[in-house]
């Protein structure tokens, strides 16, 4: 399912991006989409999986000053001890000292960010409570993003927003998982074009999604 940018732009609240924060992997329109999706549900608590250096957590905090941003990541030390560096993305798994290193540079935003570093496995996000928004951006292999999605669903509030990054050919595992889920739940996960961001459709978005569907159908049958 594709949501056109003009539809998304008309539906979601605007955000101001603090350019000085920068980005590590999620930037440009992608980070704007994540911020606007999160802001649209007026969340009290947001969970980011995973932190890296903290750029996305900072952008979320800047868009959601009245929310609590919980961001977690696994340290390189823990990943090495559990043999997790062979999954094709070892450069994204940082030493503990570098996880969230950008956050401390912004004291105004850091006060609403709760950084959690995973040191032992297995871990359970259920201990963190419920969240109104969960953003998944870490594992890129099918099994990894599948497991992260299950963890996210366990803590997502009933009217919450679940968001995935990296739906693009560079990450075939993510694409496979999203396509698999859409086949099971009837295309309830949409990608915002032209970004790599996908989200689980909830009631506030159904009208614009159906508008896109009808336009796509008409374009196929009307010359």
Image (cartoon, rainbow, N blue to C red):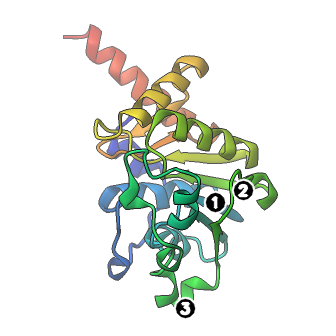
Residue 180 locus on image (x, y percent): 51, 22
Chain-order first, disc 3 or disc 1: 1
Q: Quadrant where the N terminus lies?
A: top left
Q: Pick whichever, 158 or 85, lies toward us.
A: 85
Q: Is residue 116 above or below residue 103?
A: above
Q: Is residue 63 above or below residue 204?
A: below
Say the numbered circle drawn on residue 131. Answer: 2
Tag 2 secondary structure? strand
Q: Pick whichever, 97 or 133, lies toward us.
A: 97
Residue under the point 64% across and 37% down: 203
Q: Pick whichever, 69 or 33, lies toward us.
A: 69
Residue 10 locus on image (x, y percent): 41, 50
- Per the image, the residue denoted by label 1 is 47
Say the numbered circle drawn on residue 107. Answer: 3
Q: Quadrant where the C terminus lies?
A: top left
Chain-order first, disc 2 or disc 1: 1
CB contact under 8 Å: marks 2 and 1: yes
């Amino acid at each position: 399912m594709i949501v056109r940018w003009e539809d998304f732009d008309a539906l979601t609240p605007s955000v101001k991006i603090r350019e000085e924060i920068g980005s590590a992997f999620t930037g440009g329109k992608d980070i704007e989409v994540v911020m606007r999706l999160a802001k649209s549900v007026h969340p009290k608590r947001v969970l980011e999986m995973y932190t890296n250096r903290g750029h996305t957590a900072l952008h979320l905090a800047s868009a959601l000053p009245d929310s609590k941003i919980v961001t977690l990541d696994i340290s390189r030390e823990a990943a090495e001890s559990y043999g997790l560096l062979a999954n094709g993305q070892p450069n994204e798994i940082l030493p503990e000292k570098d996880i969230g290193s950008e956050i401390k540079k912004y004291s105004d935003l850091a006060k609403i960010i709760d950084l959690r570093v995973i040191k032992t496995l297995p871990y359970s996000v259920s201990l963190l409570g419920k969240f109104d928004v969960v953003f998944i951006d870490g594992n890129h292999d099918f099994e990894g993003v599948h497991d992260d999605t299950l963890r996210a669903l366990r803590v997502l509030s009933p009217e919450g927003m679940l968001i995935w990054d990296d739906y693009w050919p560079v990450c075939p595992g993510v694409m496979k998982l999203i396509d698999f889920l859409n086949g099971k739940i009837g295309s309830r996960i949409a990608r915002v074009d032209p970004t790599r961001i996908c989200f689980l459709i909830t009631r506030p978005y159904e009208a614009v999604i159906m508008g896109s569907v009808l336009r796509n159908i008409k374009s196929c049958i009307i010359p």
